[in-house]
Image: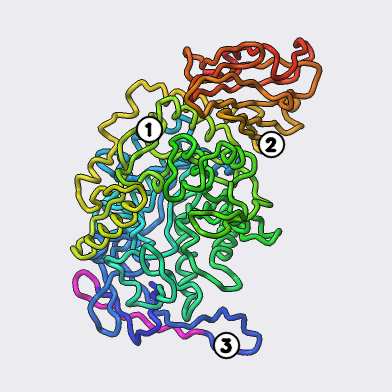
Amino acid sequence: MEVWAPAARSVAVVLHDGRRVALHPQVAPTPGAGDTGAGGVGGYHVGELVDLPEGTRYRLSLDGGPPLADPASRWQPGGVHGPSALFDPARAWDDGGFCGPPLERSVLYELHVGALTGPGTFDAAAGALDHLAELGVTTVEIMPVAQFPGTRNWGYDGVFPFAVQDSYGGPRALQRLVAACHRRGMAVALDVVYNHLGPEGNVLPQFGPYVTDRYATPWGPAMNLDGWGSDEVRRYLVTNALMWFADFHVDALRLDAVHGIVDPTARPFLLELAEATDALADRLGRRLLLIAETPDNDPRLVRDRAAGGIGIHGQWNDDFHDALRAVLTGERRGRARDFGSLGQLATALSEGWVFQGQFCRARGRRHGAAPDGVRPAQLVVYDQNHDQVGNRPGAGRLAGAVPPAALHLAAAVVLLGPGTPLLFMGEEYGSTVPFPYVVDHGDAELVQAVRRGRAAELGELLGSEPLDPADPATFAAANLHAERWGDQPNELRERYRQLLRLRREHPALAPGAATTATADGAVLTMVRHAPAAEAHGARLVLLANAGDRPVTAGPPPTASPPGSGSRWRLLASHPGDGHGSGTPRAGAVVLAPWGFAVLDAVAGEDQPSVTAGAGTAERAPASGGAA
């Protein structure tokens, strides 16, 4: 066992039966000529625990003081206020050396373990996996599972980063869920929080300078990444990330709110984490990914290290969400005040994000930079996620804010565009179950502080009171199990299946395909071009009506593939007759309000010559990918 407690003269392990095992101070190397700085500040206490079975409870005592849980605890079976327990991560894995897909081939599905099923456990979540695999999901993204207070929480109040939430089933159950995903051919991404620690049950400050008051976050104490002892804090966090990959076979980490990680050092923590992750991937011989959440529109985050970037593999793209939602809902408050133009959505599809250095009213300053060196698939796109649903009064989903047809249109824009799509649990069948922010703190004053903070934040946003985050009924109402989502026929779910099949199979949607999007009135036109070496330059065109009146639209002349002739085929549309509709007419389609049509044309020597945009649109045969 190794414990970092630089201010303590002695550290002892206090076992459940009262026995004490003294740890021994480890002498740090003395800096000298040519020293690289690897010696650190010291402060480690080490020792061996022998002949103790898994599950043995223990605490740590500093200088003979009251016993505390282990800051690197792997298991807290009694919650944040209980003792730590020994856990052996070794497991007889049966996932066949699974290797997850690259981002270019990924479809993420974000879920909250506690709200996905009635039991709210890892083992119960495994019951949803066949549905997700059949839908076309490649990667199950799990919201944070590091030990948090109580049983109801989004997971961002975790205080033991290495321990797996006991109410979800603990560490062994998480291993079972990961293995079950891999057996079905799906990767696992895990949400982790390295910008702050939660307030309740947090023992880390008693061991060392893990947090700092030099910086503030909206969520809790900031991590100390640039002050005295910060080398050891970085080591703690990097070790945590590598643990999820090595011991739990997780394939990707979603890094929560990296804009909240304050680190002005010459060698940023995120760079250190990216290098360590890539090195472990080489050693393990499988793909390991880091995906950052940030609204900063900073290309340096995902730019290759050889080009001067940090080398994070992907990042969430809030601009895409904001542009799409503003068009669909007409919302203009809060961050949405800077959005609402269909042209902005076209920019997000063509270029990656909207704000590339322009003045942003919501921020009162210029925002972002041009996405130079950013590949389209490095940007994760969505029409909703836990933040976008939960951080609004009433925690309403998109399905409660737009006409049903608009949900089909949103799915087409997200799933057929160049970004890596992310779905939020339940969106594929149009769930209207809210997903509010929830806590289960035992401290009454802390609960009141959370209530006041949420009311101030969300009341100002849309002028109404949020749901009570501490009321058990709030969390109960967020559970999806009552919808029996896996059993009921559902047109929208079939649409998701159809579009995800197109995304997998159509050559114009292959990795490396170019994208051009334009807006004309209420019509959004997106053209995807297959790489020239594939399928003779196949094209796919999405025509979408973002208005409440019918319009007629057709593929632009520039969408015509090279070759002697082509004929447009209607692959999918909404509303429709089972194949998708829109009325083929003189090379154009009639789009109903919030309707869309997907067409393709591949050059063919034996096809009649047709001018793109003025030819005849035909329905694709069953083998052409249409549902």
Q: Percent from the top left, x then y, of residue 275?
A: 59, 62
Q: Are marks 3 and 1 in contact (CB under 8 Å)?
A: no
Mark 3 Cα shell of 10 Å, populated few (<14), some (14-19), many (≥20): few
Asked if residue 182 can be seen in this view, the reply is no
Task: Name which residue lies at 69% across and 25% down.
Answer: 556
For the N terminus, the image quarter is bottom left
How are the colours assigned in the image? rainbow
Per the image, the residue denoted by label 3 is: 31
Per the image, the residue denoted by label 2 is: 514
Q: Are marks 2 and 1 in contact (CB under 8 Å)?
A: no
As drawn, 494 above or below 364? above
Say which mark, if any, is on residue 258: none
Q: Secondary structure at mark 1?
A: helix
- In the rendered structure, which amino acid carries the disc numbered 3? Pro
* Number of numbered discs overlaid on the protein picture: 3
Q: CA distance from mark 3 to mark 1?
A: 61 Å
- In the rendered structure, which amino acid carries the disc numbered 2? Ala
Task: Name which residue lies at 48% across and 15% down.
Answer: 576
Say which mark, if any, is on residue 399: 1
